[in-house]
Image (spheres, grey):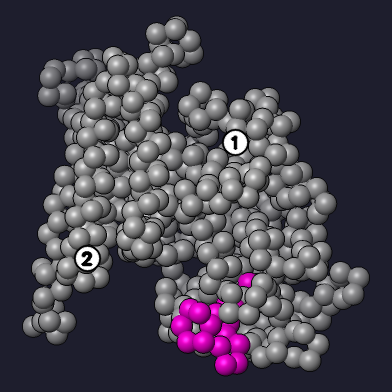
Amino acid sequence: MAQYKAPLSDIRYLMNDVIDFPAHYAALPGAADVDRDTIDMMLGESARFAEDVLHPLYRSGDEEGCHFENGQVRLPKGYKAARDLFVANGWTRMAAEPRWGGQGLPGSLGMIANEMMGAVNPPWVMLVGLPMAVMMTIDAHGSEAQRETYFPGLVDGRYGATMCLTEPHCGTDLGIIKTKAEPQADGSYRVTGTKIFISFGEQDVTDNIIHLVLAKLPGAPEGTAGISLFVVPKRLLNADGSDGANNAVSCGSIEHKMGYMASPTCVMNFDGATGWLVGEENGGLKAMFTLMNNARIGSGVQALGLADASLQGAVAYANERLQMRSLSGAKNPDGPADPIIVHPGVRQMLMTQKAITEGCRALIHEGARLADLATRGATPEIRKQVNNALGFLTPVIKGFITEVGYEATNHGVQVMGGHGYMREHGMEQLVRDCRIATIYEGTTQVQALDLLGRKTLMAQGKPLAQYVEGLRAFCAANANNEAVKPFVAALSAKLDEWQDLTQKVIMKTMTGGFDEAGAASVDYLMYSGYVIVSYWWARMAAVSAAKLAAGEGDARFHRAKLHTATFWFERMLPRTLVHRENMLAGAASLMSLPAGDFRV
């Protein structure tokens, strides 16, 4: 199994030098005490927990998998002990409000820590992450009584949680769900239906599980306008808050999957289970997006972590593995061959991994910063403005980062060749576990439609224009900065092209129909991601160039940043040329072949 060391130097660089999280926390309501020492302490503890507790369980959990018998699910050995330690160390309390027993720290700290934990054990991270997502949803849309009922157990670790959306006949098209909720005289509802793909729908490590379930009320409107959200506990609660009788909720089976073996993916049956409405009747779609947007950013974090783990394993192997001589002359003349890191073909994979990982990490950190402001901004106007900006970035964080993160993870196997394909080295597990990131919480194709359709076409390009304005301000401020002038010029040109392409796609859609937008959407998403990450590489290059000029920090670290920025702009940003041509090619070549002729 490949060794893992948390990338603390890079994380601290982003938090302290590039984005300036200490200043962000100083201005964030309720976070003024989070200084550099607090950040360093949290990062150090996260790294230790990831390296010492979670990493040793990763391969064993994959090999053992989950056990299902008579409706009961048992997690792999060590998973309960790790969670108990996580709870005992106060991690479940970190971002929760003090009135619920929490520490009230900004959610960005947990999001950034999750990269390290997810790099070494993503299934386990989902187990402990779902309760926070459920809390955020109830907090935004539920009642004070629901907060008082469920938050203490979610915060102190007694409860697990799930989100129950998908059904056997529908996934993304939630408007056709069949699960129903019948109102009862006491104000509760009887929830009946079957949900599939429910992560940790049943497990043996918590006293109770709080399910958030989408269902339809009698007489509800057709489609998504008729969806409501309900909270349905596995065990009903007594008046004093203790766990009472079992609810009519059961696990019918668990799935056999490509990866995530330590995470039970359950079929959940609700047979007249008692539940309570969260928010307004038929308001479930709005509540669902609170839940899903958090989970979508989490998917990007997961892919980033696994890409970094793959990079670490690949770099270690490439420095040790001796094969052939360098094309430019022997680099290890005293040995039988040179290490494969000297070969351009291997370097291309390693540099691609490095550029993707470090560039996407910056975007994740920016998403974490915006998520803080979206929930804790000083005024409603700030929170609304930031929510709009985060809404625009979320499909890019989810769609683009998971796609290129999976590419980077795959490169790690290729660098190691046949050894990468063997289970004992741990690289193939990273690929299997990363593969789901492009699928769940809305596939790449769904994210692309969200970005181009809802966030661009339906919004008449305003979110894009507002976002680009901030990037142009950076370019204007650095137009005469000799250290990054080529990067700024390339970025400025791409910003112009991005907006021009957006208008062309809008016109194609207006004249040719919505299939034109659908045909362009994935390429539009990927194009957008490459441009956005280019901004972050230009920004990091500016910071590192200034550090080098001032003689501050680790010179090797900052020189590596500038080198990788050059690689990004010369080798990665040109990928936009293909995406541009695909966007403009139109829908005809995709849609004209009759469905029956795909196999003749």
The reply, left or right, for residue 541 in relation to residue 516 is right
Residue that appears at 49% across and 39% down: 366
Residue that appears at 73% across and 64% down: 159
Q: Is residue 222 magenta?
A: yes
The reply, left or right, for residue 89 in relation to residue 66 is right
Q: Mark 1 or 2, which is nearer the eye? A: 2
Residue that appears at 30% across and 21% down: 479
Q: Is residue 9 visible?
A: no
Q: Pinpoint residue 440: horizontal percent, then vertical percent.
A: 44, 64
Q: Pinpoint residue 324: horizontal percent, then vertical percent.
A: 17, 29
Q: Is residue 284 visible?
A: yes
According to the picture, the residue beneath numbered tag 1 turns out to be 47
Amino acid type, residue under disc 1 in the picture: Ala
Element carrying mark 1? helix
Disc with the residue nearer the chain's start (1 vs 2):
1
Up the image or down, 86 lies above or below 51; here it is below
Comparing 348 with 511, the one in front is 511
Q: Is residue 293 magenta?
A: no
Q: How many marks?
A: 2
Q: Which mark is residue 35?
A: none
Q: Pinpoint residue 354: horizontal percent, then vertical percent.
A: 35, 34
Amino acid type, residue under disc 2 in the picture: Thr
Q: Residues within 10 Å of mark 2 (few under 14, many from 20)?
A: many
The reply, left or right, for residue 377 in relation to residue 426 is right
Q: Which mark is residue 509?
A: 2
Up the image or down, 477 lies above or below 220; here it is above
Residue that appears at 68% across and 27% down: 35
The magenta segment: 211-228
